[in-house]
Amino acid sequence: MISSYMSRRAFLKSVGLAAAAIMVPAKLRADDTKKPNIVIIYADDLGYGDVGCYGATKVKTPNIDRLATEGLRFTNAHSPSATCTPSRYAMLTGEYAWRKKGTGVARGDARMIIQPGRTTLPLVMQRAGYTTGVVGKWHLGLGERGSELNWNVDIKPGPLDIGFEYCFLIPATGDRVPCVYVENRRVVGLDPKDPIRVSFDGPIGDEPTGKDHPELLKMHPSHGHNQTIINGISRIGYMSGGKAARWVDEDMADVITGKAKDFIEKHKDERFFLYFSTHDIHVPRVPHPRFAGKSGLGPRGDAIVQFDWCVGEILEALDRLNLADNTLLIFTSDNGPVVDDGYKDQAVEMLDGHKPSGPLRGGKYSAFDAGTRVPFIVRWPGQVKPGRSDALVCQIDFTSSLAALTGEKLTPDDAPDSFNILSALLGKSLAGRDHLVEHANVLSLIKGDFKYIEPGKGPKISKNTNIELGIDPQPQLYNLRDDIGEKHNIASEHPEIVEELAALLSRIRNDGRTRPYE
Ligand code: NG6
Ligand code: CA
Protein backbone atom coordinates (compact mmCIF):
# COMPACT_ATOMS: atom_id res chain seq x y z
CA MET A 1 0.00 0.00 0.00
CA ILE A 2 1.23 3.53 -0.72
CA SER A 3 1.51 5.21 2.66
CA SER A 4 0.18 8.74 2.75
CA TYR A 5 3.65 9.84 3.84
CA MET A 6 5.23 8.36 0.79
CA SER A 7 5.03 10.05 -2.59
CA ARG A 8 4.10 7.90 -5.52
CA ARG A 9 7.58 8.43 -6.89
CA ALA A 10 9.17 7.28 -3.66
CA PHE A 11 6.88 4.29 -3.66
CA LEU A 12 7.73 3.41 -7.25
CA LYS A 13 11.40 3.78 -6.45
CA SER A 14 11.04 1.47 -3.47
CA VAL A 15 9.65 -1.23 -5.72
CA GLY A 16 12.18 -0.50 -8.45
CA LEU A 17 9.82 1.09 -10.93
CA ALA A 18 10.88 4.71 -10.80
CA ALA A 19 12.30 4.71 -14.29
CA ALA A 20 9.42 2.79 -15.77
CA ALA A 21 6.89 5.58 -16.06
CA ILE A 22 5.20 3.66 -18.85
CA MET A 23 4.21 0.92 -16.46
CA VAL A 24 2.09 3.21 -14.32
CA PRO A 25 -1.51 2.64 -15.26
CA ALA A 26 -3.22 5.67 -16.73
CA LYS A 27 -5.89 5.63 -14.04
CA LEU A 28 -3.41 6.34 -11.30
CA ARG A 29 -2.76 9.66 -12.96
CA ALA A 30 -6.13 10.67 -14.26
CA ASP A 31 -7.11 12.98 -11.43
CA ASP A 32 -3.64 14.17 -10.54
CA THR A 33 -4.15 17.77 -11.59
CA LYS A 34 -0.84 18.79 -10.02
CA LYS A 35 1.06 17.01 -12.74
CA PRO A 36 -0.53 17.87 -16.03
CA ASN A 37 0.98 16.94 -19.37
CA ILE A 38 3.18 19.78 -20.52
CA VAL A 39 3.42 20.99 -24.11
CA ILE A 40 5.68 23.86 -25.13
CA ILE A 41 4.96 25.20 -28.61
CA TYR A 42 8.06 27.16 -29.58
CA ALA A 43 7.82 29.32 -32.68
CA ASP A 44 10.88 30.60 -34.49
CA ASP A 45 11.26 34.37 -35.04
CA LEU A 46 7.59 35.08 -34.33
CA GLY A 47 7.29 38.70 -33.27
CA TYR A 48 5.27 40.40 -30.56
CA GLY A 49 3.00 41.94 -33.18
CA ASP A 50 2.74 38.94 -35.51
CA VAL A 51 -0.44 37.36 -34.14
CA GLY A 52 -4.01 38.55 -33.79
CA CYS A 53 -4.26 38.40 -30.01
CA TYR A 54 -1.22 40.70 -29.80
CA GLY A 55 -2.71 43.24 -32.19
CA ALA A 56 -2.05 41.96 -35.72
CA THR A 57 -4.92 42.70 -38.07
CA LYS A 58 -3.49 41.96 -41.51
CA VAL A 59 -2.75 38.32 -40.80
CA LYS A 60 -5.30 35.98 -39.23
CA THR A 61 -4.27 33.57 -36.46
CA PRO A 62 -7.53 32.02 -35.21
CA ASN A 63 -5.91 29.10 -33.41
CA ILE A 64 -3.40 31.21 -31.50
CA ASP A 65 -6.20 33.65 -30.71
CA ARG A 66 -8.24 30.74 -29.39
CA LEU A 67 -5.37 29.94 -27.04
CA ALA A 68 -5.43 33.53 -25.79
CA THR A 69 -9.17 33.32 -25.16
CA GLU A 70 -8.82 30.08 -23.26
CA GLY A 71 -5.56 30.96 -21.51
CA LEU A 72 -3.46 33.63 -19.87
CA ARG A 73 -1.79 36.02 -22.29
CA PHE A 74 1.42 37.66 -21.07
CA THR A 75 2.40 41.14 -22.21
CA ASN A 76 5.88 41.21 -20.65
CA ALA A 77 7.28 37.77 -21.36
CA HIS A 78 10.73 37.23 -22.79
CA SER A 79 12.90 34.77 -24.58
CA PRO A 80 16.30 34.65 -22.89
CA SER A 81 18.10 35.98 -25.99
CA ALA A 82 17.45 37.78 -29.25
CA THR A 83 18.59 34.78 -31.32
CA CYS A 84 17.82 31.11 -31.39
CA THR A 85 20.69 29.02 -30.00
CA PRO A 86 21.27 31.07 -26.85
CA SER A 87 17.52 31.27 -26.16
CA ARG A 88 17.13 27.50 -26.42
CA TYR A 89 20.28 26.86 -24.39
CA ALA A 90 18.97 29.07 -21.61
CA MET A 91 15.46 27.65 -21.76
CA LEU A 92 16.69 24.06 -21.46
CA THR A 93 19.43 24.65 -18.87
CA GLY A 94 18.10 27.57 -16.82
CA GLU A 95 21.41 29.33 -17.30
CA TYR A 96 21.89 32.63 -19.14
CA ALA A 97 23.67 31.77 -22.38
CA TRP A 98 25.94 34.81 -22.19
CA ARG A 99 27.66 33.13 -19.24
CA LYS A 100 28.92 30.32 -21.50
CA LYS A 101 31.20 30.55 -24.52
CA GLY A 102 30.03 28.67 -27.59
CA THR A 103 26.33 29.37 -27.18
CA GLY A 104 25.98 31.85 -30.06
CA VAL A 105 24.00 31.02 -33.24
CA ALA A 106 25.30 27.51 -33.96
CA ARG A 107 26.65 26.25 -37.25
CA GLY A 108 24.92 23.29 -38.87
CA ASP A 109 27.79 21.04 -37.83
CA ALA A 110 28.14 22.38 -34.27
CA ARG A 111 28.75 19.74 -31.63
CA MET A 112 26.42 19.23 -28.70
CA ILE A 113 26.38 22.45 -26.70
CA ILE A 114 24.60 21.16 -23.59
CA GLN A 115 26.78 18.57 -21.91
CA PRO A 116 25.17 15.30 -20.85
CA GLY A 117 25.09 14.97 -17.11
CA ARG A 118 23.83 18.42 -16.30
CA THR A 119 20.36 19.11 -15.03
CA THR A 120 18.07 20.23 -17.83
CA LEU A 121 14.39 20.99 -18.18
CA PRO A 122 13.62 17.63 -19.85
CA LEU A 123 15.68 15.78 -17.24
CA VAL A 124 13.68 17.38 -14.45
CA MET A 125 10.49 16.35 -16.24
CA GLN A 126 11.81 12.83 -16.69
CA ARG A 127 12.62 12.59 -12.99
CA ALA A 128 9.08 13.73 -12.27
CA GLY A 129 7.78 10.70 -14.17
CA TYR A 130 7.12 12.30 -17.54
CA THR A 131 7.74 10.75 -20.94
CA THR A 132 9.75 13.44 -22.68
CA GLY A 133 10.07 14.34 -26.35
CA VAL A 134 11.36 17.08 -28.62
CA VAL A 135 10.07 17.53 -32.15
CA GLY A 136 11.32 20.17 -34.59
CA LYS A 137 14.16 22.64 -34.67
CA TRP A 138 17.07 21.78 -32.39
CA HIS A 139 19.97 24.16 -33.18
CA LEU A 140 21.93 23.18 -30.08
CA GLY A 141 24.56 21.02 -31.75
CA LEU A 142 24.90 17.26 -31.99
CA GLY A 143 27.75 14.82 -31.47
CA GLU A 144 30.87 14.65 -29.36
CA ARG A 145 33.00 17.74 -28.94
CA GLY A 146 36.45 17.46 -30.45
CA SER A 147 35.55 14.58 -32.74
CA GLU A 148 34.26 14.38 -36.27
CA LEU A 149 30.49 14.59 -36.70
CA ASN A 150 29.50 11.67 -38.92
CA TRP A 151 25.89 11.95 -40.09
CA ASN A 152 25.87 8.40 -41.44
CA VAL A 153 26.10 6.48 -38.17
CA ASP A 154 24.50 6.86 -34.74
CA ILE A 155 24.70 10.54 -33.84
CA LYS A 156 25.50 11.08 -30.19
CA PRO A 157 25.34 12.77 -27.84
CA GLY A 158 22.06 14.42 -28.69
CA PRO A 159 18.75 15.22 -27.02
CA LEU A 160 18.43 11.60 -25.84
CA ASP A 161 21.46 12.17 -23.63
CA ILE A 162 20.14 15.22 -21.79
CA GLY A 163 16.68 14.06 -20.76
CA PHE A 164 14.59 13.51 -23.87
CA GLU A 165 13.33 9.99 -24.54
CA TYR A 166 12.32 10.76 -28.11
CA CYS A 167 13.46 13.25 -30.69
CA PHE A 168 12.62 14.13 -34.28
CA LEU A 169 14.84 16.97 -35.32
CA ILE A 170 15.64 19.61 -37.83
CA PRO A 171 19.27 19.44 -36.66
CA ALA A 172 20.09 23.16 -36.93
CA THR A 173 17.86 25.52 -38.92
CA GLY A 174 15.90 25.38 -42.15
CA ASP A 175 18.51 27.55 -43.84
CA ARG A 176 21.54 25.51 -42.76
CA VAL A 177 22.76 22.18 -44.04
CA PRO A 178 22.35 19.30 -43.46
CA CYS A 179 18.78 19.47 -44.79
CA VAL A 180 17.67 16.14 -43.34
CA TYR A 181 15.67 15.02 -40.32
CA VAL A 182 17.23 13.13 -37.45
CA GLU A 183 15.00 10.75 -35.51
CA ASN A 184 16.50 9.61 -32.24
CA ARG A 185 20.10 8.89 -33.31
CA ARG A 186 19.72 8.44 -37.05
CA VAL A 187 19.15 10.49 -40.19
CA VAL A 188 15.70 9.55 -41.49
CA GLY A 189 15.59 7.78 -44.85
CA LEU A 190 19.34 7.74 -45.41
CA ASP A 191 20.63 5.45 -48.14
CA PRO A 192 23.94 4.06 -46.85
CA LYS A 193 25.23 4.00 -50.42
CA ASP A 194 24.87 7.78 -50.60
CA PRO A 195 26.55 9.05 -47.46
CA ILE A 196 26.12 12.62 -46.24
CA ARG A 197 29.06 14.97 -46.06
CA VAL A 198 28.79 18.45 -44.59
CA SER A 199 31.20 21.36 -44.53
CA PHE A 200 31.04 24.92 -43.33
CA ASP A 201 34.64 25.69 -44.24
CA GLY A 202 34.56 25.24 -47.99
CA PRO A 203 32.79 23.45 -50.85
CA ILE A 204 32.38 19.71 -50.62
CA GLY A 205 31.31 17.37 -53.43
CA ASP A 206 30.23 18.77 -56.76
CA GLU A 207 26.69 19.96 -56.16
CA PRO A 208 25.80 23.40 -57.46
CA THR A 209 25.78 26.41 -55.19
CA GLY A 210 23.47 29.40 -55.28
CA LYS A 211 26.48 31.62 -55.83
CA ASP A 212 27.53 29.91 -59.04
CA HIS A 213 24.15 28.75 -60.30
CA PRO A 214 21.49 31.32 -59.48
CA GLU A 215 19.53 30.09 -62.51
CA LEU A 216 18.71 26.90 -60.54
CA LEU A 217 17.07 28.74 -57.66
CA LYS A 218 13.37 29.08 -56.89
CA MET A 219 14.21 31.43 -54.03
CA HIS A 220 17.19 33.77 -54.19
CA PRO A 221 19.31 34.91 -51.27
CA SER A 222 19.40 38.58 -50.30
CA HIS A 223 22.44 38.13 -48.06
CA GLY A 224 24.48 35.00 -47.25
CA HIS A 225 22.62 31.75 -48.02
CA ASN A 226 24.37 31.17 -51.34
CA GLN A 227 25.98 27.79 -50.80
CA THR A 228 24.66 24.28 -51.59
CA ILE A 229 21.29 24.25 -53.33
CA ILE A 230 18.73 21.91 -51.75
CA ASN A 231 15.18 21.83 -53.12
CA GLY A 232 15.85 24.86 -55.29
CA ILE A 233 16.99 26.98 -52.32
CA SER A 234 20.62 27.75 -51.54
CA ARG A 235 21.62 27.35 -47.90
CA ILE A 236 24.28 28.26 -45.39
CA GLY A 237 26.93 25.53 -45.67
CA TYR A 238 27.90 22.83 -48.11
CA MET A 239 26.43 19.36 -48.28
CA SER A 240 26.75 16.37 -50.55
CA GLY A 241 25.02 12.98 -50.56
CA GLY A 242 21.98 11.95 -48.54
CA LYS A 243 19.75 12.69 -51.53
CA ALA A 244 16.95 10.33 -50.51
CA ALA A 245 16.92 11.78 -46.99
CA ARG A 246 16.63 15.46 -47.88
CA TRP A 247 13.62 17.31 -46.64
CA VAL A 248 11.14 19.15 -48.83
CA ASP A 249 10.61 22.56 -47.26
CA GLU A 250 7.00 22.74 -48.39
CA ASP A 251 6.20 19.59 -46.38
CA MET A 252 8.13 20.47 -43.25
CA ALA A 253 5.23 21.85 -41.21
CA ASP A 254 3.13 18.79 -42.03
CA VAL A 255 5.95 16.40 -41.21
CA ILE A 256 6.91 17.83 -37.84
CA THR A 257 3.34 18.56 -36.75
CA GLY A 258 2.50 14.96 -37.64
CA LYS A 259 5.38 13.74 -35.48
CA ALA A 260 4.30 15.97 -32.59
CA LYS A 261 0.75 14.60 -32.81
CA ASP A 262 2.06 11.02 -33.02
CA PHE A 263 4.03 11.62 -29.83
CA ILE A 264 0.94 12.95 -28.03
CA GLU A 265 -1.17 10.07 -29.28
CA LYS A 266 1.38 7.42 -28.40
CA HIS A 267 1.79 8.71 -24.87
CA LYS A 268 -1.77 9.78 -24.17
CA ASP A 269 -2.10 7.34 -21.29
CA GLU A 270 1.13 8.45 -19.70
CA ARG A 271 2.20 11.81 -18.44
CA PHE A 272 4.15 13.53 -21.19
CA PHE A 273 6.33 16.54 -21.78
CA LEU A 274 6.59 17.70 -25.38
CA TYR A 275 8.82 20.47 -26.66
CA PHE A 276 7.44 21.21 -30.14
CA SER A 277 9.76 23.58 -31.89
CA THR A 278 8.63 24.72 -35.32
CA HIS A 279 10.65 25.89 -38.29
CA ASP A 280 8.04 28.56 -38.98
CA ILE A 281 8.36 31.45 -39.35
CA HIS A 282 12.15 31.33 -39.88
CA VAL A 283 13.69 31.63 -43.34
CA PRO A 284 13.48 30.12 -45.87
CA ARG A 285 9.76 30.76 -45.83
CA VAL A 286 8.39 28.16 -48.19
CA PRO A 287 5.00 27.13 -46.87
CA HIS A 288 2.99 24.28 -48.33
CA PRO A 289 1.07 25.28 -51.51
CA ARG A 290 -2.19 25.20 -49.57
CA PHE A 291 -0.95 28.18 -47.53
CA ALA A 292 0.88 30.00 -50.32
CA GLY A 293 -0.75 33.35 -51.04
CA LYS A 294 -3.23 32.96 -48.17
CA SER A 295 -2.13 35.93 -46.07
CA GLY A 296 -1.71 38.54 -48.77
CA LEU A 297 1.57 39.49 -47.07
CA GLY A 298 3.83 37.19 -49.07
CA PRO A 299 5.63 34.10 -47.79
CA ARG A 300 6.33 35.58 -44.35
CA GLY A 301 2.62 36.11 -43.71
CA ASP A 302 1.82 32.73 -45.25
CA ALA A 303 4.31 31.11 -42.88
CA ILE A 304 2.38 32.70 -39.99
CA VAL A 305 -0.85 31.23 -41.37
CA GLN A 306 0.83 27.84 -41.68
CA PHE A 307 2.23 28.10 -38.16
CA ASP A 308 -1.22 28.96 -36.83
CA TRP A 309 -2.51 25.81 -38.54
CA CYS A 310 0.19 23.77 -36.74
CA VAL A 311 -1.01 25.19 -33.42
CA GLY A 312 -4.58 24.27 -34.38
CA GLU A 313 -3.51 20.69 -35.11
CA ILE A 314 -2.00 20.33 -31.65
CA LEU A 315 -5.13 21.79 -30.03
CA GLU A 316 -7.29 19.44 -32.09
CA ALA A 317 -5.22 16.41 -31.01
CA LEU A 318 -5.49 17.39 -27.34
CA ASP A 319 -9.27 17.87 -27.71
CA ARG A 320 -9.80 14.64 -29.62
CA LEU A 321 -7.83 12.62 -27.09
CA ASN A 322 -9.61 14.31 -24.22
CA LEU A 323 -6.32 15.64 -22.87
CA ALA A 324 -6.86 19.39 -23.08
CA ASP A 325 -7.98 19.83 -19.46
CA ASN A 326 -5.02 17.88 -18.15
CA THR A 327 -2.42 19.66 -20.27
CA LEU A 328 -0.49 22.77 -19.40
CA LEU A 329 0.30 24.33 -22.75
CA ILE A 330 2.83 27.11 -23.15
CA PHE A 331 2.98 28.96 -26.43
CA THR A 332 5.89 31.29 -27.20
CA SER A 333 8.73 32.23 -29.59
CA ASP A 334 12.54 31.94 -29.45
CA ASN A 335 13.24 35.58 -30.33
CA GLY A 336 11.70 38.59 -31.99
CA PRO A 337 10.81 39.17 -35.62
CA VAL A 338 12.92 39.84 -38.69
CA VAL A 339 11.57 40.72 -42.11
CA ASP A 340 14.51 40.25 -44.51
CA ASP A 341 16.64 37.52 -42.94
CA GLY A 342 18.55 36.53 -46.02
CA TYR A 343 16.16 35.56 -48.83
CA LYS A 344 14.34 37.66 -51.41
CA ASP A 345 10.87 36.51 -50.38
CA GLN A 346 9.04 39.82 -50.72
CA ALA A 347 8.65 40.08 -46.97
CA VAL A 348 9.63 43.75 -46.96
CA GLU A 349 7.68 44.73 -50.07
CA MET A 350 4.47 43.01 -48.97
CA LEU A 351 4.30 44.06 -45.31
CA ASP A 352 1.30 46.26 -46.10
CA GLY A 353 1.43 48.06 -42.78
CA HIS A 354 1.76 44.87 -40.74
CA LYS A 355 3.99 45.53 -37.70
CA PRO A 356 5.89 42.36 -36.71
CA SER A 357 7.21 44.04 -33.54
CA GLY A 358 3.87 45.61 -32.59
CA PRO A 359 4.51 48.70 -30.47
CA LEU A 360 8.06 47.63 -29.60
CA ARG A 361 11.34 48.89 -31.02
CA GLY A 362 13.89 46.69 -32.80
CA GLY A 363 13.47 43.03 -33.66
CA LYS A 364 15.49 39.82 -33.78
CA TYR A 365 19.18 40.48 -32.92
CA SER A 366 18.26 43.72 -31.11
CA ALA A 367 18.84 44.92 -27.58
CA PHE A 368 15.61 46.87 -27.87
CA ASP A 369 12.64 45.04 -26.45
CA ALA A 370 11.34 43.49 -29.68
CA GLY A 371 14.45 41.30 -29.61
CA THR A 372 13.21 39.26 -26.69
CA ARG A 373 9.71 40.38 -25.72
CA VAL A 374 7.60 37.72 -27.43
CA PRO A 375 4.08 36.33 -27.56
CA PHE A 376 3.55 34.04 -24.58
CA ILE A 377 0.33 32.28 -23.62
CA VAL A 378 -0.29 29.70 -20.90
CA ARG A 379 -3.37 27.52 -21.14
CA TRP A 380 -4.45 25.00 -18.54
CA PRO A 381 -8.24 24.80 -18.52
CA GLY A 382 -9.78 24.89 -15.07
CA GLN A 383 -6.44 25.75 -13.46
CA VAL A 384 -5.29 28.94 -15.16
CA LYS A 385 -7.90 31.64 -15.36
CA PRO A 386 -8.08 33.12 -18.85
CA GLY A 387 -7.05 36.76 -19.09
CA ARG A 388 -3.97 38.89 -19.36
CA SER A 389 -0.90 39.19 -17.17
CA ASP A 390 1.68 41.97 -17.18
CA ALA A 391 4.09 40.04 -14.96
CA LEU A 392 7.73 39.99 -16.06
CA VAL A 393 8.47 36.36 -16.99
CA CYS A 394 11.10 34.56 -19.03
CA GLN A 395 11.46 31.17 -20.67
CA ILE A 396 14.61 30.64 -18.63
CA ASP A 397 12.25 30.14 -15.67
CA PHE A 398 10.65 26.97 -17.02
CA THR A 399 13.09 24.64 -15.28
CA SER A 400 12.56 26.03 -11.77
CA SER A 401 8.87 26.69 -12.22
CA LEU A 402 8.03 23.30 -13.68
CA ALA A 403 10.22 21.61 -11.07
CA ALA A 404 8.10 23.40 -8.48
CA LEU A 405 4.90 22.32 -10.23
CA THR A 406 5.93 18.67 -10.25
CA GLY A 407 7.54 18.60 -6.81
CA GLU A 408 11.10 18.12 -8.08
CA LYS A 409 14.07 19.55 -6.18
CA LEU A 410 16.95 21.39 -7.79
CA THR A 411 20.44 21.40 -6.28
CA PRO A 412 22.08 24.81 -5.78
CA ASP A 413 24.18 24.32 -8.92
CA ASP A 414 21.25 23.48 -11.16
CA ALA A 415 19.55 26.03 -13.41
CA PRO A 416 21.50 28.98 -11.98
CA ASP A 417 19.35 31.74 -13.47
CA SER A 418 15.96 30.05 -13.46
CA PHE A 419 13.43 31.55 -11.05
CA ASN A 420 10.41 29.79 -9.66
CA ILE A 421 7.68 32.03 -11.04
CA LEU A 422 5.07 29.28 -11.08
CA SER A 423 2.41 31.43 -9.44
CA ALA A 424 2.82 34.10 -12.10
CA LEU A 425 2.70 31.51 -14.88
CA LEU A 426 -0.50 30.09 -13.44
CA GLY A 427 -1.99 33.54 -12.99
CA LYS A 428 -2.12 33.23 -9.21
CA SER A 429 0.22 36.16 -8.73
CA LEU A 430 0.69 39.42 -10.61
CA ALA A 431 4.35 39.51 -9.69
CA GLY A 432 6.84 37.70 -11.87
CA ARG A 433 10.57 38.24 -11.82
CA ASP A 434 12.11 41.04 -9.88
CA HIS A 435 14.59 41.71 -12.71
CA LEU A 436 15.70 40.16 -16.00
CA VAL A 437 18.84 40.32 -18.11
CA GLU A 438 18.05 40.57 -21.82
CA HIS A 439 20.71 39.30 -24.19
CA ALA A 440 21.57 40.59 -27.66
CA ASN A 441 24.95 41.94 -28.79
CA VAL A 442 24.97 43.81 -25.51
CA LEU A 443 23.21 43.06 -22.25
CA SER A 444 20.27 44.98 -20.86
CA LEU A 445 18.72 44.84 -17.43
CA ILE A 446 15.02 45.27 -16.75
CA LYS A 447 14.07 46.11 -13.19
CA GLY A 448 10.70 47.50 -12.26
CA ASP A 449 9.66 50.04 -14.86
CA PHE A 450 13.20 50.66 -16.04
CA LYS A 451 15.42 49.13 -18.65
CA TYR A 452 19.13 49.82 -18.79
CA ILE A 453 21.11 48.96 -21.94
CA GLU A 454 24.84 48.79 -21.35
CA PRO A 455 27.10 50.82 -23.64
CA GLY A 456 28.46 48.92 -26.62
CA LYS A 457 30.29 49.17 -29.90
CA GLY A 458 28.82 48.36 -33.26
CA PRO A 459 26.46 49.56 -35.94
CA LYS A 460 23.17 51.11 -34.85
CA ILE A 461 21.30 49.42 -37.70
CA SER A 462 22.07 46.01 -39.16
CA LYS A 463 23.05 46.40 -42.80
CA ASN A 464 21.52 43.05 -43.73
CA THR A 465 18.26 43.03 -41.84
CA ASN A 466 17.72 46.77 -41.41
CA ILE A 467 16.94 46.20 -37.73
CA GLU A 468 17.84 48.79 -35.09
CA LEU A 469 20.24 46.87 -32.88
CA GLY A 470 19.97 49.06 -29.79
CA ILE A 471 23.73 49.45 -29.52
CA ASP A 472 25.08 52.81 -28.38
CA PRO A 473 28.45 53.86 -26.94
CA GLN A 474 26.52 55.71 -24.23
CA PRO A 475 24.40 54.02 -21.55
CA GLN A 476 20.68 53.95 -22.31
CA LEU A 477 17.81 54.04 -19.86
CA TYR A 478 14.15 53.72 -20.75
CA ASN A 479 11.00 53.77 -18.69
CA LEU A 480 9.12 50.89 -20.25
CA ARG A 481 5.91 51.73 -18.46
CA ASP A 482 5.65 55.18 -20.07
CA ASP A 483 7.68 54.46 -23.17
CA ILE A 484 7.22 50.89 -24.36
CA GLY A 485 8.72 51.88 -27.73
CA GLU A 486 12.04 52.94 -26.09
CA LYS A 487 12.01 56.29 -27.82
CA HIS A 488 13.33 58.48 -25.00
CA ASN A 489 16.69 57.71 -23.51
CA ILE A 490 16.45 59.19 -20.01
CA ALA A 491 19.92 58.10 -18.85
CA SER A 492 21.21 61.64 -18.43
CA GLU A 493 18.15 62.64 -16.38
CA HIS A 494 18.55 59.69 -14.00
CA PRO A 495 22.26 59.00 -13.51
CA GLU A 496 21.50 57.43 -10.13
CA ILE A 497 19.25 54.77 -11.71
CA VAL A 498 21.83 54.12 -14.42
CA GLU A 499 24.47 53.65 -11.74
CA GLU A 500 22.29 51.33 -9.69
CA LEU A 501 21.31 49.14 -12.66
CA ALA A 502 24.85 49.05 -14.06
CA ALA A 503 26.11 47.91 -10.66
CA LEU A 504 23.43 45.23 -10.42
CA LEU A 505 24.23 43.98 -13.91
CA SER A 506 27.90 43.77 -13.07
CA ARG A 507 27.09 41.82 -9.88
CA ILE A 508 24.90 39.42 -11.87
CA ARG A 509 27.77 38.88 -14.30
CA ASN A 510 30.32 38.26 -11.57
CA ASP A 511 28.18 36.08 -9.32
CA GLY A 512 27.70 33.44 -12.01
CA ARG A 513 24.13 32.89 -10.91
CA THR A 514 20.97 34.75 -9.97
CA ARG A 515 18.65 32.05 -8.64
CA PRO A 516 18.37 32.41 -4.89
CA TYR A 517 19.66 29.48 -2.84
CA GLU A 518 16.76 27.66 -1.29
C1 NG6 B 1 22.16 34.39 -39.33
C2 NG6 B 1 21.60 34.16 -40.71
C3 NG6 B 1 20.09 34.22 -40.62
C4 NG6 B 1 19.59 33.23 -39.57
C5 NG6 B 1 20.29 33.48 -38.25
C6 NG6 B 1 19.94 32.48 -37.21
C7 NG6 B 1 23.03 34.99 -42.53
C8 NG6 B 1 23.47 36.15 -43.36
N1 NG6 B 1 22.07 35.19 -41.64
O1 NG6 B 1 23.56 34.28 -39.36
O2 NG6 B 1 19.50 33.97 -41.83
O3 NG6 B 1 19.83 31.92 -40.01
O4 NG6 B 1 21.69 33.41 -38.43
O5 NG6 B 1 18.62 32.60 -36.86
O6 NG6 B 1 23.57 33.89 -42.71
S1 NG6 B 1 18.15 31.91 -35.54
O7 NG6 B 1 16.73 32.26 -35.40
O8 NG6 B 1 18.31 30.49 -35.72
O9 NG6 B 1 18.94 32.46 -34.48
CA1 CA C 1 14.90 32.22 -34.04
Image (tube, rainbow, N blue to C red):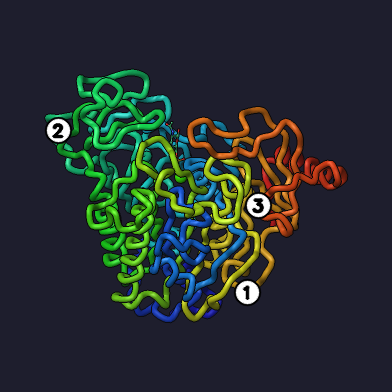
Mark 2 C-beta closer than 8 Å to ligand 1: no
The answer for how far apart the CA atoms under marks 3 and 1 are is 28 Å
The amino acid at mark 2 is: Pro
CA gap, disc 3 to disc 2?
54 Å
Say which amino acid is labelled 3.
Answer: Gly
Residue 233 badge: none
x%, y% of residue 23? 32, 68
Q: Residue at x 38, y 49 (%)?
A: 300
Q: Residues within 10 Å of mark 3 (few under 14, many from 20)?
A: some
Image spot of residue 328 (x, y percent): 46, 69
Specify the label residue 485 is tagged with. 3
Left-right relation of 488 to 327: right
Is 347 placed above or below 201 here? Answer: below
Residue 11 visible somewhere in the drawing = no
For disc 1, the marked residue is: 428
Task: Give the quadrant of ligand 1.
Answer: top left
Q: Are marks 3 and 1 in contact (CB under 8 Å)?
A: no
